[in-house]
Amino acid sequence: MTKSKIVSIDEAVAEIPDGAKVALGGWIFNSQPMALVRALIRKGARDLNLIPAPGSIAPDMLIGAGCAASTVCVFISFEQFGLAPHFRRQAESGALKVYDLDGPAIAGGLRAGICDLPYMPIPDLGTDLPKYAPEHYWPLPSKPGERKMLAVAAVKPDVCLLHAQQADEHGNVQHLGPPFFDAMIAQASRKVIVSVDRIVSTDTIRRNNHLTKLPSAMVDAIVEAPFGAHPTTSPSLYRADDAHLKEYVKSSASTDAFVGYLDRYVRGVAHSGYLDKIGGSRLAALGVSETNLK
Amino acid sequence: MASKPSLGETLAVLLARDMVDGEKVIIGTNSDIQLAACNLARHMQAPRLWWISGPGGMVNPTRDHLLSTADFENIESAESWMDLPVMIDFIDWKIHFFDFAILSALQVDRFGNINTVVVGDQRKPKLRGPGTVGISALCGLAKRFYVCLTRHDRSAFVPRVDFLCGAGHMEGGDSRERMGLPPGGPKLILSPLGVFDFEPVSKSMRVKSISPGVTLEQIRDNTAFDLVVEDVPPTTVMPAGHELDLLRTHVDRRGELRRKFP
């Protein structure tokens, strides 16, 4: 029998080399792989090239902690809390190289990556995107009267970090809410690391097999990380922690304040220690129940 | 008697009025006003409006209060939800699947091109925005689109967007068609100061109606290009009592629009 795919959080990120192309799953404040992101910062990752699905604090914290040399930007936003603070600051200072991609370029690029094709065609939508990311967009020849087309380069992350609600030891991953781009990202990535809020038995997986969005053959490592998406939401299990997101934004106003934030919540703090700092009653209150849907 | 509508409520009602029963609509992230407009239209003239949230893939989530468009709890009240890789084909590739999209922007220009990427140079921007996501495809491929802005000043209404990430009428005239884009483009731009459409030949932004208490001078002072003005533009017809009642009792019971966009 092969080994279980369950590994510790530090083991999971140990082999991600500096300079790697790291994709991040979820969507804005949904299922950001935060426990894995914090582990990557603890490990002192450097010069990463990020490929986030439309995201928020996962790419922003890696950028703020000095782990990223570049990022793809499909959409990086803090929604009702404003612009992503570190992404914004480092993009504006020129410290961070940003490759702006639109939906067709990330979706087409991932599909090309999945299918081992060098590129995918997309219609030329008349934007300025190709001008600023010629590595990702180039014109395709067309006959007179045909639609103008662009090629978008294959996107092939070295590794992806995802968060889902549950998995078994074989690496069958179940999403109890929208999987967003997670399955495409997993298919396109050379290595797939998934944190889950809970490990369940294979019997449980089989009983609800329609929820298995990532079958075990697509997954390399599973990390058990309860509340591993905190402070973002893990659909159907817990809501986003708006107070913590506000604290993060506030702590991102100055370098000193952000060093303080990282010292308190990230550097030298194991995942269990992080949860202790957030506090049991706070976490419990984020749990989804009829009473807090009001 | 209902209290005066807030900015968010007014914009939601103005958008809702323009929706036609049976149309297919898409809205994006952080879209409280847009979401309210769709659900309000379903309570008024467009009960069979079919709307979907881009990120969550939920179809017609109809709660009596507003939740973020990516919020998984919307799923509970949706007719269906579509996996993103499936939805992407409708959003990013299919021509005219959506009758319209409702978007927001950092900048909009005289031809209705929009920018959510950067102010200034992309390589060293003055202001780094959130990015493009589906905006390029929706502006390019939907039958029409709306732009809803909660501010109107010379930094938002610019002669030419610093980064074109959603094509409006491009350089005006027939340039959009010459670029090879399907027929479409921006229909209305809504701001706190007024409602704007596009002159049919030049495709230049035109004043359609002016918010009560606002003057044409004020609009001109806050717009960094020359707007087309024909005759004397009428005053925008503000939300009626029954529209506001429906909005407050069936769509936004918790008063999110009043709180977020006073």
Image (cartoon, coloured by chain):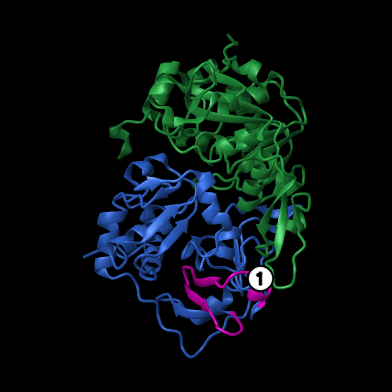
Between residue B201 and residue A124, name the one nearer to us.
A124
Judged from the image, the secondary structure of the residue bearing numbered disc 1 is loop
The residues colored magenta run B175-204
Q: Any idea which chain is the blue one in this picture?
A: B
Task: Work out whether A10 lies above or below A153.
Answer: above
Label 1, on which residue?
Answer: B180
Residue A56 in view in this figure: yes
**What residue is drawn where x is 67% and y is 70%?**
B160
In the image, residue B200 lies in the stretch drawn in magenta: yes
Q: Which amino acid does label 1 sit on?
A: Gly
Q: Any idea which chain is the green one in this picture?
A: A
**Residue B72 at x, y = what percent?**
41, 40
**Residue A82 at x, y = what percent?**
55, 48
Quadrant showing the N terminus of chain B:
bottom left
In the image, residue A96 lies in the stretch drawn in magenta: no
Tell me the quarter of the picture where residue A56 sits. Answer: top right
In the image as oriented, which residue stretches furthest toward the bottom? B231
**Residue A191 at x, y = what percent?**
67, 27
In the image as oriented, which residue stretches furthest toward the top? A1
Quadrant showing the C terminus of chain B:
bottom left
Chain letter for mark 1: B
Q: In this view, does A187 lie to the left or right of A285?
A: right
Tell me the quarter of the picture where residue A18 sits. Answer: top right
**Residue A114 at x, y = what percent?**
65, 39
Tell me the quarter of the picture where residue A201 sits. Answer: top left
Residue B129 in view in this figure: no
